[in-house]
Image (tube, rainbow, N blue to C red):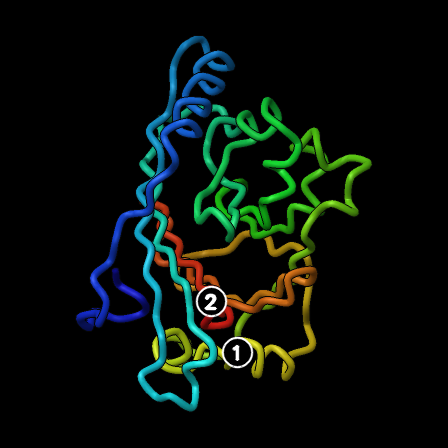
Amino acid sequence: MALCSCKEQAITPQPATMPTSEASARQGIEGNKSGGQTLPQPTIIQQVYVPANDLFAHTRCRAWRITWPTYPAGTSPNQIPTMFSVSTGTPYSFNYLNNTSATTTYKTDFNLYHNNTLASVYDMWSQLTHVVGNTSMLEQTWFNKSEYTAAQMETWVKGRPSNFETFWEHTVATTTEIENYKQGDLFQFRLVKQNRYGGIRIVSMTPRIIEVYLAEPNI
């Protein structure tokens, strides 16, 4: 897992897996909504970093590297997994979320792929059926363009995840949507309800590769 550098990682990456029942349900819904055809899913590698220094080990970092296939021209954007959930560590398509229980939408946090845009689920009312009238059930995510380098963010991920919160407090330009991101961009985010902080790195646009980092209590 290339988290900001080519250095060997201390923890062996493990592919993220979706529960069999959920994977089957997703394939069925996607197939029914697209004439029986299902799209290949992104490849997800997940990793947990706990600081080696005990002074900072109260906070760990969960990290995901998501690689989307290169989809054929004309692919419906409604089929492409894009709404990311930090609780499950996987992105969901609009088709899937709009044709399953509203509670699945409530578990998602932000858009990653669609329209090259980062956006809080709170603002995705034009794409997601279960958002309208239910904003009190949804997470609200704030983003900002990071002032820090990839190397600096890597030190937070591996050695001091609490810095995602510390250095968020030093920034002022925040928004619930960032459009037209490009390769190499780095962002920081805050999950308001969960009171969690993290980062996003746009590794590549073709193929689309995005890394998501989340600082959380090490319990």
> Residues at badges 1 and 2 in contact (C-beta under 8 Å)?
no
Kindly give the residue lying farthest to the right in the view shown: 133
Other residues around mark 2 within 10 Å, as few (<14) / some (14–19) / many (≥20): many
Other residues around mark 1 within 10 Å, as few (<14) / some (14–19) / many (≥20): few
What kind of element bears circle 1? Answer: loop
Please tell me which residue lies in front, 99 or 67.
99
**Percent position (x, y) of residue 26?**
45, 25
For badge 2, the amino acid type reads: Leu
151 w.r.t. 15: above or below? below
Q: Which residue is mark 2?
A: 186
Q: Which residue is mark 1?
A: 147
What residue is shown at x 48% (from left), y 44% (from top)?
A: 113
Instruction: Describe residue 24's horizontal placement relative to residue 196 as left or right.
Output: left
**Percent position (x, y) of residue 170?**
63, 84
Instruction: Describe residue 203's horizontal placement relative to residue 170 as left or right.
Output: left
For badge 1, the amino acid type reads: Glu
74 w.r.t. 3: above or below? above
Give the number of marks.
2
Instruction: Describe residue 189's horizontal placement relative to residue 39 as left or right.
Output: right
Please tell me which residue lies in front, 16 or 110.
16
